Amino acid sequence: ILLTDQAKVLCEWLCLFCTEACKSDGQPYCPRSLSSLLSGLHRYIEASNPHKFKIQSDDGEFGPLHTLLENLFRKVHEQGVGAAKTQAEIITSEEEQQLSL
């Protein structure tokens, strides 16, 4: 499928992959993780497929993929996936000096 010469077919399968991809516990991937997975697939396609597609372009044949990703990322952010920021604990000057010893 990844080596097809039809951009529309590849776009449809990438869209299907994005909608169904999830962690082993069934939870959705955060947007950054899903983007990384797609980047890996894109590198493979670029290296292996003689037909050069502009997957990264959000217009043309792969526009539906980018629209789907925008909607999917918005949905998982609304669910709180990948949206939580972790703040490091604040340390005192004394603790900082102990760490530098």
Image (cartoon, rainbow, N blue to C red):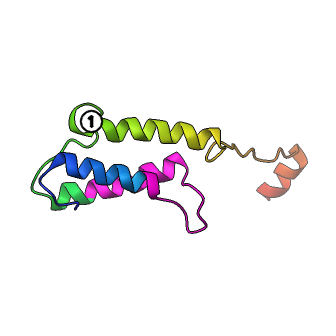
Report the front residue among 99 and 40.
Answer: 40
Q: From what the image shows, is residue 76 above or below residue 44?
A: above
Q: Residue at x 72, y 46 (%)?
A: 86
Q: Is residue 29 found inside the magenta-colored segment of the image? A: yes
Residue type for callout 1: Ser
Q: Residue at x 69, y 43 (%)?
A: 85
Question: As drawn, which residue projects farthest toward the top?
Answer: 59
Q: From what the image shows, is residue 82 above or below residue 24?
A: above
Secondary structure of the residue carrying tag 1 is loop
On the image, the x and y values in percent for residue 84 come to 69, 44
On the image, the x and y values in percent for residue 78 come to 63, 38
On the image, the x and y values in percent for residue 25 come to 61, 67
Start and end of the magenta stretch? 19-43
Q: Residue at x 85, y 46 (%)?
A: 91
Question: As drawn, which residue projects farthest toward the bottom?
Answer: 24
Question: How many discs mark residues in the rendered view?
Answer: 1
Q: Is residue 27 found inside the magenta-colored segment of the image? A: yes
**Residue 56 left/right relative to 26:** left
Task: Find disc 1 in the rendering and name its residue.
Answer: 57
On the image, the x and y values in percent for residue 73 come to 51, 40
Question: In the rendered image, which quarter contains the N terminus?
Answer: bottom left
Report the front residue among 72 and 93.
Answer: 72
Which class describes the residues within 10 Å of circle 1: few (<14), some (14-19), or many (20+)? Answer: few
**Residue 84 left/right relative to 59:** right
Question: In the rendered image, which quarter contains the C terminus?
Answer: bottom right
Rendering quarter of residue 79:
top right
Q: Main secondary structure of the magenta part?
A: helix
Q: From what the image shows, is residue 72 above or below residue 46?
A: above
